[in-house]
Image (cartoon, coloured by chain):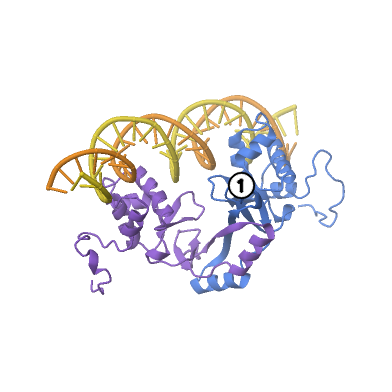
Chain colours: A blue, B purple, C yellow, D orange
Amino acid sequence: MSSPCAQHQHAHRLIQQPLTELTEKLRRGARKVTVPRQAILDVLRKHASPLTNKEIHAALGKEDCDLATIYRNMHTLELLGLVRRYDFGDGAARFELSAEEGSSHHHHLVCTHCGFIVEVDECFPEEFQSAIASRHGFTQVQHRLEFSGRCPKCQSR
Amino acid sequence: MSSPCAQHQHAHRLIQQPLTELTEKLRRGARKVTVPRQAILDVLRKHASPLTNKEIHAALGKEDCDLATIYRNMHTLELLGLVRRYDFGDGAARFELSAEEGSSHHHHLVCTHCGFIVEVDECFPEEFQSAIASRHGFTQVQHRLEFSGRCPKCQSR
DNA sequence: AGTTATCTGCAAATCAATTGCAAGTGTAGA
DNA sequence: TCTACACTTGCAATTGATTTGCAGATAACT
């Protein structure tokens, strides 16, 4: 249709919300920029560790947004690449803003006793992964890698 | 079944089941060698890929053992080190006989489309893991690592 | 402002996993 | 071989996370 000026990114920022590329991605995916979605992303921006749906719900104030809406939106946001899903094996999915939204690709080290979470930059070697993929004829291979152990504070017990 | 008689001393004991060290471990852990437990381990011996509780239940024949019993026993067997628990992120835990029971430590590559599972021998480098542990002061650090991708047969769709 | 496809809240439904309880069963010891 | 008792099991109910149906809002485009 019209000729969008892609280079003119710093034109005029939105007034209410700092919606850098969130808006773009949502609209590109034929999704609406709704109050709950902005609120969820705001909560994630303010937290360093990945949050569960319930934690996001609590952080929002229970009345601001239904829990089912959060569940639905986390799927949507994950699909659009705005958030990344993690599973620490404790029965509840956790979410973080994805790389393009501030954090870079990383894994986690979780204390099995108190739940304390540290980000870990080490990653499974890319060349190993390629070797695995080609050996078995798989494509689009990804990995999930999480570490667990006992944090310094919990070692006395 | 031509096996070198490794444990001839208990010959009169084991009539029905080839309970090599399973029995030992169970008894050492003050657990009983029950019909459901033997049946569960037998099912796992016959399958190459890790199974869910429900799959084990189905393989046993629904009437032979209650599903709750399987859930309880998988905990017990995991605790005693007879089976290893895996989580492929699809909402149901899966189990495999643990290393001492035939398989050695390994990870999995799962097809996101059809669920086909391949064993992967590559592992996260031990020296990296040690470095991570000491950097953050964690002890007893373990990792969970699973790969996913599209298997050869599913690439045409 | 009007239209419409997308959302949202609410409640009910799923699904995996856990638990209480009474009856059943291995095991060690007599 | 028999007995006692701790460990197990089946069954039903429960928990906790996640999903879904539906009717009433709402964002986005004209």
* Marked residue chain, label 1: A
Indicate the secondary structure of the residue bearing disc 1: loop
Neighbours of disc 1 within 10 Å: few (<14), some (14-19), many (20+):
some
A26 vs A135, left or right, is right
Check the image and report above or below for B62 versus A99.
above
The image quadrant that residue A33 belongs to is: top right
Q: Is residue A146 visible?
A: no
Query: Which residue is drawn at the image coordinates 49% and 61% (left, top)?
Result: B111
Which amino acid is tagged 1?
A: Gly
Residue A125 position, x and y percent, is: 62, 69
Residue B151 position, x and y percent, is: 49, 65
Q: Is residue B101 visible?
A: yes
Residue A111 position, x and y percent, is: 61, 51
Q: Nearer the viewer, residue A142 or A9?
A: A142
Residue A41 position, x and y percent, is: 71, 43
Query: Which residue is drawn at the image coordinates 63% and 56% (left, top)?
Result: B138
B138 vs B66, left or right, is right
B153 vs B19, left or right, is right
Q: Nearer the viewer, residue B156 or B63?
A: B63
Check the image and report above or below for D16 versus A1.
above
- Disc 1: which residue: A115
The image quadrant that residue A67 belongs to is: top right
A109 vs A25, left or right, is left
Q: Nearer the viewer, residue B74 or B4?
A: B4
Query: Which residue is drawn at the image coordinates 65% and 49% (left, top)?
Result: A153
